[in-house]
Amino acid sequence: MGAALALVGKGRHFASLGIREVTRQAGVVPTSFYRHFRNMDDLGLQLVDELGLVLRRMMREARANVLQSDKLIEESVGIFVAHAQANRSFFLFMAQGLAGESRAVQEGIRSEMRYFASELANDLRRLRLMDHLTDADLDLTCDLVVRTVAFSLTDLLSVSPDDDYQLGQIRKRTSRFLQMIFVGAGHWQSDGT
Amino acid sequence: MGAALALVGKGRHFASLGIREVTRQAGVVPTSFYRHFRNMDDLGLQLVDELGLVLRRMMREARANVLQSDKLIEESVGIFVAHAQANRSFFLFMAQGLAGESRAVQEGIRSEMRYFASELANDLRRLRLMDHLTDADLDLTCDLVVRTVAFSLTDLLSVSPDDDYQLGQIRKRTSRFLQMIFVGAGHWQSDGT
DNA sequence: TTTCGATGTGTACACTTGTTCACTAATGTG
DNA sequence: CACATTAGTGAACAAGTGTACACATCGAAA
């Protein structure tokens, strides 16, 4: 799994990786692959599981740091960007998987995003922000937020990991997106604007 | 190019296609490939160019039909979904390319999206909607709109092309997203919040 | 009608690929 | 200690891969 991630991190697309290639990168003979996975799709699925852990770690850190801040959004986006940097290959894999060729991986990643969105909704409910929204509309908002952040992965991962200026731009732009969404949610009348 | 698209339409990922595979699908001998393209990346780039034409056609149709409607958003989303259905493989290719393995294709698709966003901004300016926004903030809004619609491709293309119920759900959800964004833009003060 | 440029063909070569099978080394449990 | 499980090995095979080169076909311009 580490080898596959490493190749993805080097710019390859997961769908184009082969068994031999992965085992070569892992410094192991091709047949060893079958001790752990049935095929590449299987490997992909297990990567999705690990991705879930990474996302949960990120969420925990966000919850710990964000509450005491008055700039919820900037702080959260900052943490997201930091994690995306620290786990570049994982997030690259995630971005690829959304339109990947394995239906199962695709569904796995979507499901992680749904979970993330629902946790976000819970947090907002707990903080009594957006109290005027129905549950359905709060879910809608959180889904949109998560999508927007996820899309920013494609920006994030296409710039050099140490181009601090561009990174800052992306952080700022993503924060503005979220601000605009929350302004919209703040003025949203739950019965058709 | 048609053969490559056909394979993508069948669920394959563009990054995993090989020259021989494509020529086989095209009913032509492998060496013929080199009469038209230097390699697969080259083919990808030419596909992006054609994708540009498809998008422009869509934009034209949207402009023709949307002006006389009071439901700008629903109408536009409807046209988008219809085109995505009619050119499934093209849009599949677009969704894949955003996180694809060819940097050039990636940049090409982004650039199409930028163009699309800027045209949208022009239209909104011409219609004198969102007149209170600075140019920069209008661009921001349109970028967010285009991203949101683009992301909905991953929903759209993962359901069966003739599951009308799901299709309707996606159309409705995407419309709500855009409504929320425009409510946000409508209440946006161009100097912070 | 000849000539030319674009497209397609057939053969060939050196690799790479997924998967199989029987075998060996390491690991931790009774 | 012995034993069972797990992980890794090496050789083998049929099939597929990218690419090179010389040759054939065809439509249009001369």
Image (tube, coloured by chain):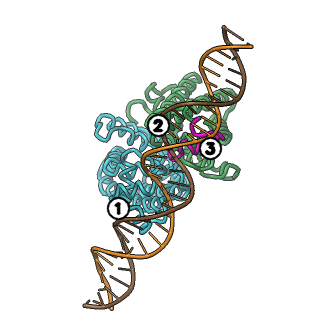
Chain colours: A cyan, B green, C orange, D brown
Residues at marks 3 and 2, common chain? yes
> Which region shows up in magenta?
B15-31
The answer to which quarter of the image holds residue B3 is top right
Residue A78: x and y in percent read: 32, 45
The residue that label 3 is drawn on is B24
**Subunit under mark 3:** B
Amino acid carrying mark 2 in the image: Gln
| Residue A3 in which image quadrant | bottom left
**Is residue A193 among the parts visible in the rendering?**
no
Give the residue pinned by disc 2: B106
Task: Give the prevailing secondary structure in the magenta stretch.
Answer: helix
Q: Identity of the amino acid at label 1?
A: Val
The residues bearing labels 2 and 1 have C-alpha atoms spaced at a distance of 33 Å
Residues packed near mark 2 inside 10 Å, few (<14), some (14 to 19) or many (20 plus): many
Q: Nearer the viewer, mark 2 or mark 1?
A: 1
> Where is mark 1, residue-wise?
A28
Pointers 3 and 1 in contact (C-beta within 8 Å): no
Secondary structure of the residue carrying tag 2 is helix
Label 3 and label 2: CA atoms lie apart by 26 Å
Residue A190 x %, y %: 57, 49
Residue in view at x 42 percent, y 67 percent: A36
Residue positioned 51% across, 52% down in the render: A138
Q: Are marks 2 and 1 in contact (CB under 8 Å)?
A: no
